[in-house]
Amino acid sequence: MNQMNIRENILENRKRLNFTQQNLAEFLNISKAAVSKWEQGHSVPDIQYVGEMAVLFDISVDELIGFSPDLSKEQIKTIFHSLSASFSRENYDDVLQEVKRYGKRYYNCYPFLATLINLLVNHVNLAETPEETLELTETFIDRVMTHTDSAKLKEQMMFYRAAMLITHGQPGEVIPLLKDYTEPRMPINSVLAQSYLMTGVPGKAKEVLQAEVYESMVFIMSDMTMMMYSDLYNDLEAVIERGTALDEAFKLKALHPSSTLNFYLVAAMKMSGDKERCLFYLNEFLECVKHLADAYYLHGDEFFSDIDDWLNNLDIGNNAPVSLMNAKKQLIHSVTDNEVFRDYKEDIAFKNIVHTLKTTLEEK
């Protein structure tokens, strides 16, 4: 990814000018052997020669050494998923040092730093001691928040800063930070879709509205899960009933299983005193896991038929922020190590659910 590649650049630009190694050596008043070593990668030129060659080749010094302070969207995605996979396979501290190197190298590429923040937030649970990861996350947040001109990135940083405050046990500081975000949202996507229709681009209008509904469904399921988990309801049965209806209406188990599996897991926890219903919701959770294992990426369906391009264009693409290997461990532990289900450890139906859960995930 944008690695400094001065060797190839010297060779390519020398040939572009129809210069021999001897010609370039004479221009720089050095030996031909020195030029040969540069082009073979055995040594690198001193800074004075870099400047002189940049002038000769009519390019910038950055272009000559092959360095760009920015990364393309595709490059950002590739690095993100490579590092995410490394967190699953390699020593956590070693990968964290690699994240630091990337952050230092592209310290002015704010979309990339935002993606590294996403990476760290989703993998800090793997650290034996989280302090170094949290400190690096805070540094990146401060950098982006202070220097970016992007309203979108500033809003993302506000979210991550709030998450960090909660992690540090300072929820009281989150309230003044985010309370204004509870105001009713303007229907921006509706206006955008209308604009696409009026300019003769109905396909884009359809994509915008489908993406809006898709995102809303995911957020609603997440909020209803939190309402259940934190006892923020007047009627538990009503929350479960409406969440289940939303799942069935939009086929969310298959469309976005990571949102529904949490919903049904919490429903099972809340119904732990009723064995039949508890096991029913655990089986619903299991169905979500099966769908997740079959398609571990974001995708549309027959209703959301026009959102795949939108998903692919997200900051990290349509792949999940956490590798399947790490997700497997978390999903299994969420049932096997859940104290709420301790009374069912020896129950045959519960054991079958655990067995199927492990088998489903181990096969992937």
Image (cartoon, rainbow, N blue to C red):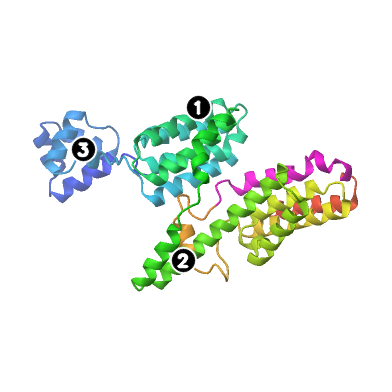
Q: Are marks 3 and 1 in contact (CB under 8 Å)?
A: no
Which residue does the image show at 79% across and 47% down from the upper left? 270
Q: Position of residue 8 (x, y in %)?
A: 27, 44
Q: Which residue is mark 3?
A: 61
Report the Cα–Cα distance between label 2 and label 1: 39 Å
Circle 1: residue type = Glu
Q: Magenta segment range?
A: 320-344
Q: Position of residue 218 (x, y in %)?
A: 59, 55
Which of disc 1 and disc 2 is earlier in sequence? 1
**Quadrant hosting residue 5:** top left
Please indicate, yes or no, whether residue 83 appears anywhere in the rendered image.
yes
- Give the numbered dot on residue 207: 2
**Quadrant hosting residue 34:** top left
Q: Nearer the viewer, residue 153 or 94?
A: 153
Q: Is 290 situated left or right of 72 in this image?
A: right
Circle 2: residue type = Glu
| Residue 321 on the magenta span | yes
| Residue 15 on the magenta span | no
Which residue does the image show at 62% across and 49% down from the upper left? 324
